Image (tube, rainbow, N blue to C red):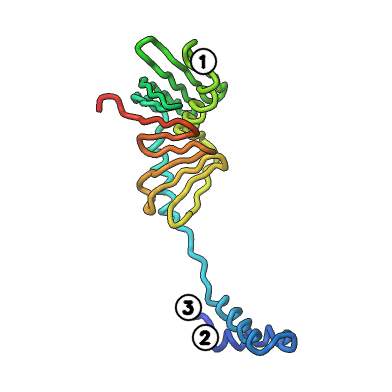
Amino acid sequence: MRAGSPSVAALLRSAESLLQPFRRLTEPPLHRLLVIAVALAGCATVAPSDPTLEARTRQTFREQFPRPARLTHRAIITAAGRQFTCDGLLQVAADGNARLAMLAPVGVMAEVRVRPDDVVRTAPSFPQNWAQEHVMAVVRLLCPAAGDWQFRLVDGRPVLTDGQATHVFSADGRQWLEARAGNVRAVPGRVTGPGYEVELRTVGQ
């Protein structure tokens, strides 16, 4: 109980007076339980928000998804029991618009532009619907829009969400752990979705 707060006895007396009209409507044991419950409610405190933790979490978020950025990864894609490898060139502009080009020895397999046009172009041998449904979702998850990201604590961990995607951080806010959007999940170095898995390796490692 906080310093300067009323004593437990005083709270019990106050609760007793509040519940006096209900005395005749309840059995003695139940009446006493109500008195104690009201008294304890007077001792409850709400944990204050931690502006330092929120600021640190947002800083980690900006560092994890910098703008502008130019990243090159080697992607090992497993889907429908098959596996193939390609290089991915991801470019993110300062305004959050993103372009991903998936490159193979034979040339460009697919090109995805997210915001403002949501353009998808694929090579004849690469399924257009797969790129539209899955590659686009991955790019959106790894290139968060500059939206209104709300901060909250979930199971003791900081979370940022815009209502569509959710990013989870370590308890101290210093490490990005994962992101989820619908049935797509991203963790450091790996993205999984319905029926596929993408392993991301920085080129040169």
User: Residue beneath label 3, please?
Assistant: 1
Residue at the spot of label 2 = 7
Q: Position of residue 168 (x, y in %)?
A: 44, 46
Report helix, strand or loop for mark 1. Answer: strand
Q: Residues within 10 Å of mark 3 (few under 14, many from 20)?
A: few
Mark closer to the chain start, 3 or 2: 3
Image mark for residue 99: none
- Which residue occupies 39% across, 27% down? 69
Marks 3 and 2 sit apart, C-alpha to C-alpha, by: 9 Å
Q: Earlier in the sequence, mark 1 or mark 3?
A: 3
Return the x and y of residue 142 as percentages of the image width and height: 44, 33
x then y, percent, for residue 140 = 50, 31
Mark 2: amino acid? Ser
Mark pair 1, 2: CA separation: 71 Å
Position of residue 197 measured from the top left corner of the image (x, y, whole percent): 42, 32
Q: Is residue 117 above or below residue 21?
A: above
Q: CA distance from mark 1 to mark 3?
A: 63 Å
Which SS class for mark 3?
A: loop
Q: With respect to residue 127, does 173 lie above or below? A: below
